[in-house]
Image (spheres, rainbow, N blue to C red):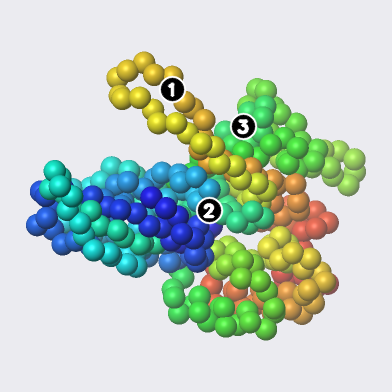
Amino acid sequence: MFVLAEMKDVIRITPEHFHQSLSESITTLLNRKLANKVVLNVGLCIALFDITDIGHSYIFPGDGSSHTEVKFRYIVFRPIVEEILIGKIKNCSREGVHVTLGFFDDILIPVNALQHPSRFDETDQAWVWEYPKEDGEKHDLFMDSGESIRFRVTSEAFEEIFPTGPPGTECTTQTIAPYRLVGGINEPGLGLLTWWEAPEQDDGDENEDQENDE
Amino acid sequence: METIKPNAAFLCNNEVMLVLQKLKDNTQKKHKREGSLATVTYETVHYLQDTVCKNQSAQSIQKFLDAMKQFKLTKTEKLMMVNTPPRTELEIQLIVQESEERLSEDDVRNIITLVNEIFPPTDST
């Protein structure tokens, strides 16, 4: 789920930071610029991994700051499509199930990728998997928020976000997520971890315990 | 700013956690904490602490990868196995594409045994 991204940037260090070592200033500035931000088609940046190359520093006329070209590697959250992840249910809505990883929230499991057959329970505001029992009855499996859920990443989408206005002004506030993941749980083994943990209770046909001798 | 390679290398959860924990210790000692960096490291470490990776070590992961060489798995499949060690046949089916054709029943049983041996299960998860 995490990858290293190789990037290049010119870092401007203002004179009041000249007392610090160059690599220390670069680390601080790169983390300030990138940490917890989404880079288009790269992913959600977490933290600086290492600096691979520091070029010459230049001072331009009229600006006392030094400008240094650096190549560095950054830890980026970018799950592979088809990867299996474990998250927690944030909430359920008519659109589907919203999942959070704690540091990343924009994960949706749409209705058509839930276990089949599922229904939305209006009173509990939760999706319910109507697990068919052998005698024709249904066993309701609720997907309550806060539960751990295993899902497959089925697609990802990046959205270009325009800069927001200065704080305090009435600018059109944007609520689009810059990086969204779409997941699916419509395969045996996916869904709440508790669904598949105790095979003797569910008695599902795909559920085979490792101790079972086939 | 320019991206040279969007994914130069894969990192497993354990490696990320080690880097972030080191960073957390360093920043607490030296500087005043940077807002967004502190947020994202805190949240990520918080997430990673609930996963199996906190009980893993570089040695155990290396040992596991060496043991997995015989099964002809792809790099991403092995990465997923390290991040979420499969303990049932069902989990292996999810991780490995077309596992029925590529792995025999003995292979699957061997993988589960190896997982339980190298990454022993904890009661908390």
Q: Residues within 10 Å of mark 3 (few under 14, many from 20)?
A: many
Label 2 and label 3: CA atoms lie apart by: 24 Å
Q: Residue at x 59, y 42 (%)?
A: A157
In this view, the residue in front, B123 or B69, is: B69
- To which chain does the residue with label 1 belong? A
Q: Residue at x 74, y 64 (%)?
A: B97
Residue at 34% of width from left, 68% of height from top? Answer: A52
Q: Disc 1 residue type?
A: Thr
Q: Tell me, yes or no, if residue B44 can be seen here.
A: no
Query: Which of these two is toward me, B31 or B55?
Result: B31
Residue identifier under label 2: A78
Q: Residue furthest front?
A: A61
Residue with the mark numbered 3: A92
Please identify, in this view, whether the residue under mark 1 or under mark 3 is nearer the observer: 1
Q: Left or right: A188 with respect to A66?
A: right
What is the distance, in whole Å, between disc 2 and disc 1 at their CAs? 26 Å
